[in-house]
Amino acid sequence: MNGFKTTLLLTTLMVLLMGVGQLIGGRNGLYIGLVFGIVMNGFSYWFSDKIVLKMYRAREIEEADNPRFYRIVRAESQLADLPMPRVYIVPSNAPNAFATGRNPKHAAVAATQGILGLLSDDELEGVVGHELAHVKNRDILTQTIAATIAGAISMLAMIARWGAIFGGYGGRNDNRGGGLGLLITAIVAPLAAMFIQMAISRTREFAADRKGADISGKPLALASALRKLHNGLARHPLPASTSTAHMFIVSPLSGKGMANLFSTHPPVEERIARLEKMAYS
C-alpha cells in the first residue's frame, strides 16, 4: 500500500511538472517540462550521493577509525541481507544520521559525531536499522527524485512569475490563461509540489521506522533514540539545506506548531507512539 501511494504521488509530481511546462510554453513547454524532469532525475540518480556527502563534509572511515560504529553498520547490514555500505562520519555535534546512494550496491550510511556520543549501542543499532531500511526500500532514490521534481517545479514557477509580470506568454487570447493563469500557477504549483514531496517523505519515514525496528529487533531502542535526537537537535542544531532535510532520520529543520505542518518528517511523538505500539503488540 505504501509503495502504491508513493508511486501515485511521484506520478502526480511529474504530471504537475509537465502541466506547468505546458502552461508556460504550450505543447512545446510540456515536452520541455518532461525532458527537464528526466534530465534532472538522471543527474540526481548518478550524483546526488556525492553532492550530499560533500555538502556535509562527511569523511569515509574504515573499521580501525571507529570500530564501534563500523561494526554496528556491518552487523545490521547482515541482518538486513544487504551489501556492506560505505561508512561516513560527519564532523558535527548535532546528533543525526542519514543514508544515501542510488541502490543497495552503492549505498552509504553517515552519522554525525554528535549521535555517536549520544546514543547507546542498542539505540545506535535502531538508527542504523532505520537507515538501512531506507536503502532496502530504495527510499533514497525515491525521495531524491521527489525533491528534484519539486525543485524543478519551483524553478518553472519562478519563470511563470516573470511571465505574469510581463503579461504572460502568447498574448491575451492564449487559452493558457495569460498573465493571470501564470500568476496562479506560480503560487499554487510550488505549494502543491511541496505538500506532495512532504507526503512521500512522511510515508517513507513511517515505513523505515517499522522496517528498521524489524532489522534491529529493537523498536523501543529506536523510539528512545528518536526522543534523544529530537531533544539533542534543539540544543545542537545542524545547519542543513531544505533540499536535503528529508534525508536525515530526524528533521534538522523541525519545529513546533505550524513548522511541523511543513516538515518532511512526521511528528517525532507519533513515530515513537507507533514504535511503542509495535513493541508491545
Image (tube, rainbow, N blue to C red):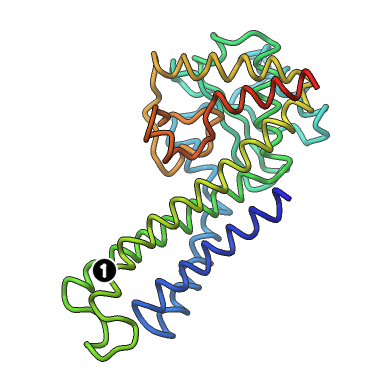
Which residue is drawn at the image coordinates 83% and 34% (left, top)?
81
| Residue nearest the observer in this picture, 35 or 24 | 24
Residue visible at 53% across and 50% down in the picture: 47
Left-right relation of 278 to 33: right
Q: Name the residue under label 1.
A: 183
Residue 172: where, in percent of width, then height? 22, 87
Residue at left offset 70%, top offset 20%: 276
**Residue type highlighted by circle 1:** Leu
Q: Quadrant of the C terminus?
A: top right
- Residue 281 appears left or right of 170: right
- Judge left or right: residue 81 versus residue 220: right
Where is residue 69? Give x, y as percent: 65, 16
- Give the x, y percent position of residue 45: 58, 54
Q: Which residue is drawn at 68% across and 10% down?
A: 121
Q: Position of residue 37 (x, y in %)?
A: 49, 66
Question: Residue 8 versus residue 146: which sits nearer the camera?
Answer: 8
Q: Quadrant of residue 99?
A: top right
For residue 279, above or below residue 255? above
